């Protein structure tokens, strides 16, 4: 049986026909325009790789949060709840019937309040709500008014006046009113700028243009048409060679149809690089053709590639934005950076959970409890951290509230005594 030939090479090609590789073979006699063309192609290829890397990573990140981080967070919250219930039991019914010293009861009361108002602030169940009513003082009208005054002062620093807050009863309603005011102010400013721009454009159209301005405008329009024409010519050449209706062989017709679909998508997206890559792959152009492109045509190609690179830069920035806002501001973040942060968060969660589980054991033994409280008092050991790892990042990726900060203890020197 005779071997079937493929006019555009076999489906599985072994030769590297990438545009970047082809351009690398013709650097000896580069001029400025040709060098810029090669640089733009290289940058676009790099941005494409960056974008694909991030698109692949987002799924892995969500899987890591769901499978590695969230189970530890759930366990930590459960341990914090157990600690709150245990402290209530110790304050109500001391272990072994021995009453705690006054200083120890005060310490436990402070720890209970901090647990309920910070670590377990967002947790809502019957037992915790009962503990809040028992241990946490209700917010008075005076406290609420003081908080609203402080909120007003803070908003005024940012230039937001909220004296006429339309009956806001607390700081949350005051902030919501301020948010609406800022949004309305921003929309009004944008609308005013649109009107000013429209008036400027109208005046500019009404003014007679100088000969120099007319020439410059005509030159810009001509360049834009030339750029569009260059892109269209590349696409037409591809369409002529790839039209599947002209191919009698079913398998080759299927292959041409797939390539034609790729060309259509690239043309609609003004993706000149993919169109040129397709020309190389079907051997419609070669390295000699790229080397012989006239500078004017190449300059048109460069304009298309610059626009394509700008769009890719915006897309990569959009994908990276949630990560760069949390812990990576001021530099370009990579998936490896985020993975390291997730590893650190996982380690921190695990250590906090193990520490709290050990504390639960200590608190159930009267002697160990007293040792724990004495050590905490002498070393100022109990503290809470309002900034907790990747909470803001998880919130931005999952559009869910970040969990509250959790209690942590500094490690004491020496080994913990277990009795």
Image (cartoon, helix red, strand yellow):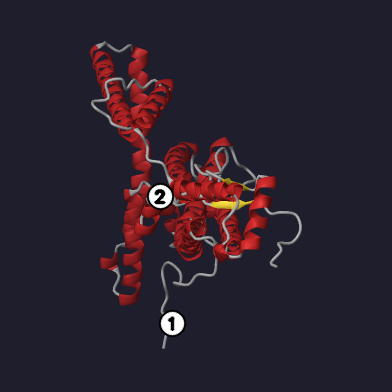
Point out residue 100 in the picture as x, y percentages from the top left corner: 58, 54
Residue holding disc 2? 134
In the visual, does 357 lie left or right of 120? right
Which residue of the protein is positioned furthest toward the right in this rendering?
Answer: 414
Q: In which quarter of the image is residue 195?
A: top left
In the visual, does 186 lie left or right of 136? left
Answer whether residue 242 is visible to the viewer in this image. Answer: yes
| 229, 201: nearer the viewer | 201
Q: Residue at x 34, y 65 (%)?
A: 258
Residue holding disc 1? 3
Q: Residue 153 carries which label?
A: none
| 147, 87: nearer the viewer | 87
Point out residue 262 in the picture as x, y percentages from the top left corner: 36, 59
Please rate how many residues cluster around mark 1, counting C-alpha atoms within 10 Å: few if below 14, some from 14 to 19, many from 20: few
Answer whether residue 237 is visible to the viewer in this image. Answer: no
Q: Quadrant of residue 179?
A: top left
Q: Which of marks 2 and 1 is nearer the N terminus?
A: 1
Q: Which residue is drawn at 60% across and 41% down?
A: 30
For residue 287, above or below residue 419: above
Distance from the alpha carbon under mark 2 to that under mark 1: 88 Å
Point out residue 302 in the picture as x, y percentages from the top left corner: 47, 39
Q: Which residue is drawn at 34% across and 13% down?
A: 211
Label 1 residue SS = loop
In the visual, does 20 lie left or right of 410? left
């Amino acid at each position: 049986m005779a071997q079937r030939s493929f006019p555009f090479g076999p489906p599985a090609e072994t030769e590297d026909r990438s545009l970047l590789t082809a351009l690398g073979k013709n650097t000896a006699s580069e001029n400025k325009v040709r060098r810029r063309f090669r640089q733009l192609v290289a940058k676009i290829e790099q941005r494409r790789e960056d974008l694909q890397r991030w698109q692949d990573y987002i799924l892995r990140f969500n899987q890591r949060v769901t499978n590695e981080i969230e189970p530890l967070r759930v366990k930590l919250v459960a341990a914090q709840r157990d600690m709150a219930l245990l402290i209530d039991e110790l304050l109500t019914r001391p272990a072994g019937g021995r009453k705690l010293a006054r200083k120890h009861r005060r310490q436990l009361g402070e720890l209970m309040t901090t647990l309920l108002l910070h670590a377990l602030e967002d947790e809502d169940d019957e037992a915790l709500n009962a503990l809040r009513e028992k241990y946490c003082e209700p917010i008075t009208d005076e406290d609420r008014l003081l908080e609203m005054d402080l909120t007003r002062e803070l908003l005024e620093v940012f230039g937001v006046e909220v004296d006429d807050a339309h009956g806001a009863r607390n700081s949350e309603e005051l902030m919501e009113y301020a948010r609406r005011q800022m949004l309305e102010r921003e929309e009004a400013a944008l609308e005013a700028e649109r009107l000013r721009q429209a008036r400027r454009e109208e005046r500019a159209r009404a003014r007679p243009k100088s000969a120099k301005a007319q020439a410059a405008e005509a030159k810009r329009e001509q360049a834009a048409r030339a750029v569009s024409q260059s892109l269209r010519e590349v696409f037409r050449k591809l369409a002529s060679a790839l039209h599947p209706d002209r191919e009698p062989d079913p398998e080759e017709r299927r292959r041409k149809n797939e390539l034609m679909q790729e060309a259509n998508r690239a043309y609609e997206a003004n993706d000149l690089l993919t169109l040129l890559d397709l020309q190389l792959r079907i051997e419609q152009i070669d390295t000699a053709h790229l080397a012989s492109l006239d500078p004017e045509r190449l300059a048109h190609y460069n304009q298309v590639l610059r626009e394509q690179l700008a769009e890719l830069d915006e897309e990569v920035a959009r994908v990276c934005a949630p990560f760069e806002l949390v812990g990576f501001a001021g530099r370009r973040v990579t998936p490896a950076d985020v993975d390291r942060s997730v590893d650190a968060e996982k380690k921190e969660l695990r250590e906090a959970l193990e520490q709290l589980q050990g504390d639960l054991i200590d608190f159930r033994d009267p002697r160990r409890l007293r040792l724990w409280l004495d050590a905490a008092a002498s070393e100022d050991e109990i503290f809470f951290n309002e900034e907790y790892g990747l909470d803001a990042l998880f919130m931005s990726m999952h559009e869910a509230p970040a969990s509250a900060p959790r209690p942590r203890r500094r490690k004491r020197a020496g080994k913990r005594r277990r009795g």
